[in-house]
């Protein structure tokens, strides 16, 4: 930022008059700066004496949050809560994040502003999805709850657990079929929009953290690198060799390409619909909690605000500055925006273009 009284626009940019003490001023594309040093310079001319604040800049494009904080591709948004946000999902430009508090938060303008919605249950929620007609969230006490009015009211669908120590960690939906996974290896399946549930776990008792589906296959991941798959809407599950014993915390798919993430920066990729898996270098040793995709672009988030991005369908990954050091527990994309949510109510937003820079 440069302050002076003689502004001369040339090619859409302001230039300083030549003056003693100023040899050059560098501009970033679209006004973007990466690193800044401040230099006060006195300009004398006739009876006028001005002071100029010059930002000496090095390179690259950045984005600023509402307070002017440099976040390099991500913008921090005020969520209205300080409770941890554990899961996030979207339908068009409407977004919902759930977590440890008594409220969920909702944005109807693509993540720009957020409002609290009181949920009917006081149990914390760990994950949320939108199934085309309702928001479906899972959480403590094997809870699965649903809202058809963007979080204004909720209907609890199952509470088969007597203790909050037993939890549903992840949930996914495909039409009328809902599947929730969690502690003690639980795999809860409903084929009637959550009216009735059955535990279909006949594989092992590994804790399961995440579940996702494509047109033909459901995959759940969890403890000790566990990967299990079902091709009959959760009736039967088979164990797949993941190639890792690290704890897997999140999974997502794009067609027949699947990506799972977890402890120690673990990233594993399957390009044959979950049959075989290959470990990829993530470039980080930090825990990764969640992953999402848009086409061949993938984003994973995790510990201490880590964000890694792949633009070649999960083959290679690069770290991107997020502007926060808070843990990020969930990430999703609606086609135009990526939003991540996490510790202490953290919400950050990025555009697809910004992620590719």
Image: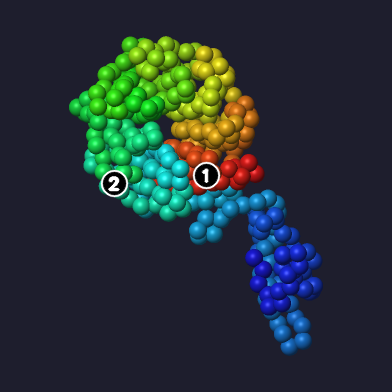
* Image quadrant where one finds the C terminus: top right
Residue under circle 2?
152
The secondary structure type at the circle numbered 2 is loop
At x 42% / y 45%, what residue is drawn? 94
The x and y percentages for residue 32 are: 65, 55
Q: Is residue 188 above or below residue 65?
A: above
Could you say which disc has been placed on residue 64 in the image? none
Farthest residue, direction left = 162
Whether pointer 2 and pointer 1 mark residues with C-beta atoms closer than 8 Å, the reply is no
**Dot placed on the residue nearer the N-terminal end, 2 or 1:** 2
Is 173 left or right of 33, judged from the image as shown? left
Q: CA distance from mark 2 to mark 1?
A: 24 Å
Res. 337 mark? 1
The quarter of the displayed image where residue 30 is located: bottom right
Image point (75%, 64%), residue name: 11
Q: Position of residue 53 (x, y in %)?
A: 66, 69
Q: Residue at x 31, y 44 (%)?
A: 149
């Amino acid at each position: 930022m440069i302050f002076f009284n003689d502004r001369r626009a040339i090619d859409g940019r302001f230039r300083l008059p030549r003056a003693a003490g100023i040899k050059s001023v560098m501009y970033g594309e679209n006004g973007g700066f990466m690193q800044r040093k401040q230099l006060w310079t006195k300009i004398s001319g006739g009876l006028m004496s001005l002071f100029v604040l010059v930002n000496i800049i090095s390179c690259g494009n950045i984005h600023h949050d509402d307070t002017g904080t440099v976040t390099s591709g991500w913008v921090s948004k005020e969520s209205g809560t300080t409770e941890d946000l554990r899961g996030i999902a979207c339908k068009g430009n409407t977004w919902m994040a759930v977590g440890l508090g008594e409220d969920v938060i909702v944005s109807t303008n693509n993540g720009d502003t957020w409002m609290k919605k009181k949920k009917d249950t006081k149990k914390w929620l760990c994950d949320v999805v939108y199934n085309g007609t309702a928001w479906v969230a899972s959480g403590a006490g094997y809870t699965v709850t649903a809202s058809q009015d963007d979080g204004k009211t909720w209907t609890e669908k199952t509470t088969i657990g007597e203790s909050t120590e037993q939890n549903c960690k992840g949930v996914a939906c495909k039409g009328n079929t809902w599947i929730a996974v969690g502690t003690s290896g639980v795999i809860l399946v409903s084929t009637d929009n959550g009216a009735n549930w059955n535990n279909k776990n006949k594989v092992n008792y590994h804790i399961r953290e995440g579940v996702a589906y494509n047109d033909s296959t459901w995959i759940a991941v969890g403890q000790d690198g566990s990967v299990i798959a079902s091709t009959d809407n959760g009736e039967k599950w088979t164990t797949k060799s993941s190639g890792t014993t690290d704890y897997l915390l999140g999974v997502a798919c794009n067609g027949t390409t699947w990506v799972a993430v977890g402890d120690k920066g673990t990233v594993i990729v399957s390009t044959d619909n979950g049959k075989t898996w290959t470990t990829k270098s993530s470039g980080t040793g930090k825990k990764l909690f969640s992953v999402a995709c848009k086409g061949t672009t993938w984003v994973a988030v995790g510990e201490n605000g880590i964000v890694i991005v792949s633009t070649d369908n999960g083959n290679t990954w690069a770290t991107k500055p997020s502007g926060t050091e808070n843990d990020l527990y969930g990430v999703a994309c609606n086609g135009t925006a990526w939003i991540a949510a996490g510790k202490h109510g953290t919400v950050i937003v990025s555009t697809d273009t910004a992620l590719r820079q």
